[in-house]
Image (cartoon, rainbow, N blue to C red):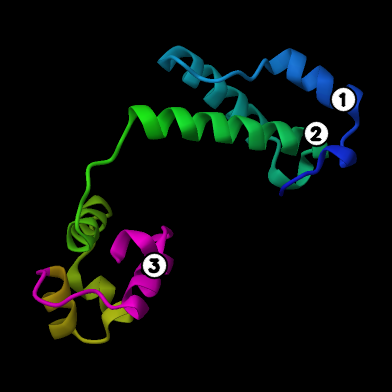
Amino acid sequence: MSVTPSELDERKYGRLLAKTLPVAIKSEAENERMLKEVSRLMAKGEDNLTLEENALLEVMAILIENFEREHYSIPDTTPHEMLRFFIEDRGLRQSDLLPVFGTSGRASEVIGGKRAISKVQAKKLADFFGVSAALFI
């Protein structure tokens, strides 16, 4: 939930900022500190957060994302490699993907890299694995 500054109670938000001290993350220790703060807020439950807590959470998420993008880059992988990774990581079998591909032959061809992953299949895979379709395109 994105919050605009005019919606915030400045005093409440100021107290949260003073307590949390979000800054540009430069070290692993600072990243861990921010992750703990995010976890603390998330433990309250999304529906139980104030507007000010939501705003702070958004700021910390951006700071964490920027640090991790710079320090934990994911090597380029092909859509087929991503698919095989998710299958192996979750202990799935080819037959588990029949709802996505329709037939075992098509699933085998796609998983084996003999057939490209279509946009429709990429969207179904994204829903199936709970990730972005961009990983499969």
* Residue drawn at point x = 43 percent, y = 14 percent: 27
The answer to whether mark 2 and mark 3 are in CB contact below 8 A is: no
* First in residue order: circle 3 vs circle 1: 1
Q: Is residue 104 above or below residue 127?
A: below
Between marks 2 and 3 in the image, the one whose residue lies nearer the viewer? 2
Q: Is residue 100 above or below residue 70?
A: below
**Residue under circle 1?**
12
* Residue drawn at point x = 26 percent, y = 71 percent: 96
Give, as a three-letter code, the residue at label 2.
Glu
**Residue under circle 3?**
128
Residue 64 appears in view: yes
Q: Position of residue 131 (x, y in %)?
A: 41, 58
Give, as a three-letter code, the residue at label 3.
Phe
**Residue under circle 2?**
52
Q: Nearer the viewer, residue 51 or 77?
A: 77
Q: Secondary structure at mark 2?
A: helix
Kindly report the distance in space between the C-alpha atoms of the residues bearing marks 2 and 3: 34 Å
Q: Is residue 24 above or below residue 42?
A: above
Q: Position of residue 110 (x, y in %)?
A: 16, 74
Kindly report the distance in space between the C-alpha atoms of the residues bearing marks 3 and 1: 40 Å
Q: Nearer the viewer, residue 82 or 119?
A: 119
* First in residue order: circle 2 vs circle 3: 2
